[in-house]
Amino acid sequence: MNDRVVVKWLTPPVPLPRTPEVLAHLVDVGFKDTAPPYAALTRVDGPQEVLLALVTGYLPEATDGWEWCADEAEAGRTDFAPTLGRLAADLHLALSTFPTSASPAPASPASASPASASPAEPTPPGPERNAVRAEAALREALELTDGDDGDWLAGHAGQLRQELVPLAEPVTSPRILIHGDLHVGQILRWRDGYAVIDFDGNPTVTGADPLQPAARDVAQLTTSLQHVAQVAIKRRGTSPDDAARWAAEARTRMLAAYRDRLAGRGAADLLDESLIRPFEIEQECRELIYSARHLPRWRYAPMGVLRDRYPEESR
C-alpha cells in the first residue's frame, strides 16, 4: 500500500468472480461511494481464469467499520445511521441495473422501476431455496453451538424456526445482484465520507444464488449494528441498556433513510420488509457457524443479540 493505491492479493487465487465486472458497472452507473477500482490481475490456470489481485484507490484516513462504529456506540451517537441507509440504498439502486438482475415477474413499461428495468433471467425456486437455506443454517448452528449457549439455542429453536416461516412465502420484491456480505466492517469511514468495499460475497456461504432480495443485505447490515452494540458492551464498557438503546435507534434511523431514498428514486418495491426479520435470524445462525468454525471468541456477539431478542425467556 502507498498513498495512491491498495493492492488486494487473493491467496490462493480464486476462479474469476464477478467482482471486477461489478466494480466496472458501479463506475458506469455513477456510484462513487467505494474505493475507485483501477485494475484486476488475472491469469489462465488450466481450463479457467483466476483472479490474482485487485487494485483500487487508496482512501486517506480510512477507519474500519468495526472501529468507527464502535466509537459511535460507545458515545451513543447515531447521526451516522441515515448516511449508512442512503449509502446502502444507492448501492442497491446501482446493483439493480446490473445485467443479471431480475424481477419476480415482468413489469409493464409504465410501472417499471430502476430495480426491475434490467434484463431478466428465469426465476428460480426462490421461496423454497430461501427457506431451505435458512433451515440448514439453523440446524448447523444448533449442532455446532455447545455449552450454556447451546442449551439456550436448543431451548429457543422453536421460536427461531417460527421466525423463518416468511422465507417460505413467494418473494414479491425484485431479485438483484446484492453485495452479499454487507456489514459495517465493509464500510470504511475516510477523510471524504463513507465507502463500501469487498464485493467478493459471503465467504461462509457456498453456492448462494447471486440474485437475492435487497432485504438480505439490509438484514445483514442491521444485524451488524447489533453486533457493534455487543462489541461496545464487551470491549468499551458500555452498559447493556445504553448499547441496546443505541442499536435500536441506529437501526430505526438507518432503515428510515434507506426507505426514503428508495421512495425518492421511485423504487420503493425494492425492499420487502417482511423478509428483514427472518434474514436477521438466519444471519445470526451464520455468525454462530462462523464462530464455531473459524473464530470461537466471536460467539458472544450473535448470542448476545439472540438473547436480547427474547429477554423474558433468557433471564
Image (cartoon, grey):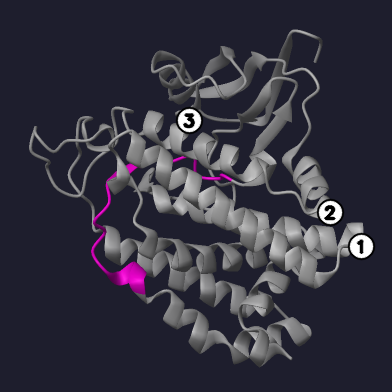
Residue 256, x across and y down, in percent: 48, 50
Residue 1 % position (x, y): 80, 15
Residue 224, quarter of picture: bottom right
Query: Where on the picture, by quarter, is residue 188?
Result: top right
Task: Describe the element under mark 2 as helix, strand or loop.
Answer: helix
Magenta range is 166-182
Q: Position of residue 133 (x, y in %)?
A: 42, 65
Residue 237, numbered circle: 1
Task: Give the vertical position of 206 relative to 234 (above or below).
Answer: above
How far across and how far down the image is residue 214, in percent? 40, 47
Please tell me which residue is depicted at 29% across the width and 66% down the height of the picture. 128
Tag 3–tag 1 contact (CB < 8 Å): no
Q: Earlier in the sequence, mark 2 or mark 3?
A: 3
Closer to the camera, 284 or 86? 86
Q: Tell me how far mark 2 sits from mark 3, CA to CA.
A: 38 Å
* Residue at x-position 50% and y-position 51%: 255
Q: How many marks?
A: 3
Q: Residues within 10 Å of mark 3 (few under 14, many from 20)?
A: some
The amino acid beneath tag 2 is Glu
User: Is label 3 or label 1 in front?
Assistant: 1
Question: Which quarter of the image is occupied by the C terminus?
Answer: bottom right
As rendered, which of 140 and 78 lies closer to the eye?
Answer: 78
Q: Which residue is mark 2?
A: 74
Query: Residue 17 shows which numbered tag?
Result: 3
176 drawn magenta: yes
